[in-house]
């Protein structure tokens, strides 16, 4: 199986748009990368290449690849290549004739019109129904539809049209009836055609209009002035195939309303319609169910230039319709069918299908319940919130995907909102408690500062007391010096008095000793006082430092408190 739809995960922003538009429940896998970013990747096994995510992804994370570069490389290398162009080329390229002329100048041998293959396809359907009876058939020009049936709805294989698509009818016609043996390139409106071409090995390159246009622009190619036309003979009504209901219109042109042909297009409805088809009783089914993936048909297919205007397309399609219903053309179309009857073998245009089933992941109700619990959805209201932000249409669908391990609870907007609200409540409570504690701290630092100031004031009283004490010591020292001198004099006088002065001399000696002892005590006290002075100075400077720190802390905490109060946890 080719890998057509690609994913550049670096560009994915996890917006879920691709999941929202994907008709296949299991084709996208959502997870969180190592940076915690939501990413969505394709499960190529489950993807049917409907291309819806290509249009939905604004980031360019989803893109497709085709064979355009390969085709031009081979062509320039001299490879013999013939081309056929889908009828939607007429709505996608105003100057497709100049495009053909340019391709021929590069070496393209022949250019066939798939409108002719579409006429063969119409002829094949009518002849098949005439031969085998009006049994229900699902049309198959759309490879996304075929992929869906082959991968996901094998019970519908028996209904898939046995007639090849217009492109493959063209390829069969070219190879079997025109003896073209080289390589064949399709100029196509559809990225998914690669599946059909690989499955049948009849076409070698899928060159989509979009990539072809990009190639022309990228290489600054100027198309030649002179136009060139198709090499195949003129088609009938096949040009209308790329319109929604194109096959229906062509069939009804030939058989009128005798056969019931229903139609459906648009990926939002067509796959659900096919699911219902599988459950219907045969009597309720149309003879032909004309189904296309793209809502505007192949004219605005997955490989088309996306800026084309639908009214512009319809104007061109109507011009083709009007031309084909002119009397001479009606005559021509009848002759064309007669020619097909004479020259073509219906069996050459029969398609066989090989199922490539992918089985849905089976999950139990318990797992779905666990997924709802992981989504914090415990009641009926939250289980039916159904906002679609996760890309799933309903919360139940999302729970199923989580149970299947292809999505994660962290991708639910409602759960994230609930989680954030809960965390904000917690943060708010923590903040309130922080504010309360901070205010207490502010008060306490103010009171500590006050206490320090009180101590400093009291220390100044102590300093005064020490200073008076020092004064008193100085007085004692002075007195003891005087007493010492007086006692010395008294001793001298006592010595002079001889025997009579003996007792007085003893007293004078005692007084001198007392004076000396007072002087010694005063000296020791002075030492202690000097130390007390030093301690006082140190205490004072420490207290001043503490007071400064307490004021600074107070101011800083006050600023934090005011700033914190300004923070709002209210929802806007
Ligand atoms: S659409 Fe899908 S692939 Fe593209 S960015 Fe969004 S989630 Fe990613
Ligand atoms: S191409 Fe279609 S099926 Fe595949 S992932 Fe995209 S939307 Fe889904
Ligand atoms: S509430 Fe969650 S699970 Fe439900 S649809 Fe929205 S995002 Fe998806």
Image: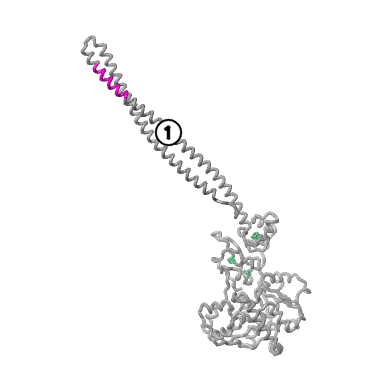
x and y, in percent, of residue 533 in the image: 36, 32
Q: Nearer the viewer, residue 128 or 519?
A: 519
* Residue farthest along the top direction in this orientation: 500
Look at the picture and state if 541 lies above or below 500. below
Q: Which residues are magenta?
A: 475-489
State ligand 2's quadrant. bottom right
Indicate the quadrant where residue 42 lies: bottom right
x and y, in percent, of residue 400 in the image: 67, 61
Please give the residue where the numbered disc 1 appears in the rendered image.
Answer: 457
* Residue farthest along the right direction in this orientation: 283
x and y, in percent, of residue 362 in the image: 68, 63
Left or right placement of residue 115 versus residue 288 in this view: left
Q: Nearer the viewer, residue 131 or 414?
A: 414
Residue 288 magenta:
no
Indicate the quadrant where residue 527 lies: top left
- Picture quarter with the C terminus: bottom right
| Residue shown at 65% from the left, 68% from the top | 24
| Residue shown at 34% from the left, 25% from the top | 472
Label 1 sits on a secondary structure element that is: helix
x and y, in percent, of residue 319 in the image: 66, 83
Look at the picture and state if 36 lies above or below 118. above
Q: Decide: few, some or many residues near mark 1? Use Cα within 10 Å; few <14, some 14-19, many ≥20.
A: few
User: Is residue 375 visible from the viewing direction of this image?
Assistant: yes
């Amino acid at each position: 199986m080719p890998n057509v739809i690609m994913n550049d995960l670096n560009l994915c922003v996890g917006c879920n748009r691709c999941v929202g538009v994907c008709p296949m429940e299991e084709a996208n896998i959502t997870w969180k990368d190592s940076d915690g970013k939501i990413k969505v990747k394709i499960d190529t096994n489950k993807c049917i290449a409907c291309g819806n995510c290509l249009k939905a992804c604004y980031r360019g994370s989803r893109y497709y690849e085709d064979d355009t570069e390969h085709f031009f490389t081979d062509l320039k290398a001299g490879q013999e290549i013939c081309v056929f162009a889908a009828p939607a080329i007429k709505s996608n390229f105003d100057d497709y004739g100049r495009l053909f002329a340019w391709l021929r100048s590069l070496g393209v041998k022949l250019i066939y019109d798939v409108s002719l293959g579409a006429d063969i396809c119409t002829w094949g359907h009518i002849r098949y129904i005439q031969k085998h009876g009006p049994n229900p058939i699902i049309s198959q020009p759309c490879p996304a539809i075929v992929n869906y049936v082959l991968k996901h709805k094998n019970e519908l294989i028996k209904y898939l049209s046995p007639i090849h698509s217009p492109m493959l009818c063209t390829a069969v016609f070219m190879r079997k009836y025109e003896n073209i043996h080289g390589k064949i390139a399709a100029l196509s409106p559809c990225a998914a055609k690669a599946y059909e071409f690989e499955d049948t090995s009849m076409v070698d390159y899928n060159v989509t209009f979009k990539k072809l246009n990009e190639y022309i622009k990228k290489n600054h190619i100027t198309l030649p002035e002179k136009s060139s036309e198709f090499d195949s003979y003129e088609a009938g009504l096949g040009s209308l195939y790329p319109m929604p209901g194109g096959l229906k219109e062509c069939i009804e042109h030939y058989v009128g309303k005798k056969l019931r042909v229903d139609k459906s297009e648009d990926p939002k409805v067509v796959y659900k319609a096919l699911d219902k088809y599988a459950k219907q009783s045969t009597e309720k089914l149309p003879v032909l169910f004309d189904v296309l993936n793209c809502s505007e048909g192949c004219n605005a297919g997955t490989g088309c230039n996306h800026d084309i205007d639908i009214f512009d397309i319809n104007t061109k399609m109507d011009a083709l319709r009007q031309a084909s219903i002119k009397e001479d053309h009606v005559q021509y179309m009848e002759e064309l069918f007669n020619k097909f009857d004479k020259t073509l073998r219906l069996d050459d245009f029969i398609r066989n299908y090989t199922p490539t089933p992918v089985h849905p992941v089976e999950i139990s109700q318990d797992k779905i319940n666990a997924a709802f619990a992981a989504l914090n959805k415990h009641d009926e209201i939250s289980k039916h919130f159904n906002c679609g932000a996760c890309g799933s249409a309903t919360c139940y669908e999302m729970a199923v995907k989580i149970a299947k391990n292809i999505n994660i609870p962290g991708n639910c907007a409602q759960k994230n909102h609930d989680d954030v609200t809960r965390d904000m409540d917690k943060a708010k409570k923590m903040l309130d408690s922080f504010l309360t504690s901070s205010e207490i701290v502010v008060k306490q630092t103010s009171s500590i500062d006050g206490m320090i100031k009180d101590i400093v004031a009291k220390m100044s009283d102590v300093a005064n007391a020490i200073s008076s004490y020092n004064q008193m010591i100085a007085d004692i020292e002075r007195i003891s010096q005087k007493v010492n001198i007086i006692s010395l004099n008294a001793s001298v006088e006592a010595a002079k008095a001889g025997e009579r002065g003996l007792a007085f001399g003893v007293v004078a000696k005692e007084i001198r000793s007392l004076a000396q002892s007072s002087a010694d005590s005063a000296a020791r006290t002075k030492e202690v006082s000097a130390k007390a002075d030093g301690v006082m100075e140190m205490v004072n400077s420490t207290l001043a430092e503490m007071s400064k720190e307490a004021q600074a802390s107070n101011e800083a905490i006050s600023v934090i408190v005011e700033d914190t109060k300004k923070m709002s946890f209210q929802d806007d």
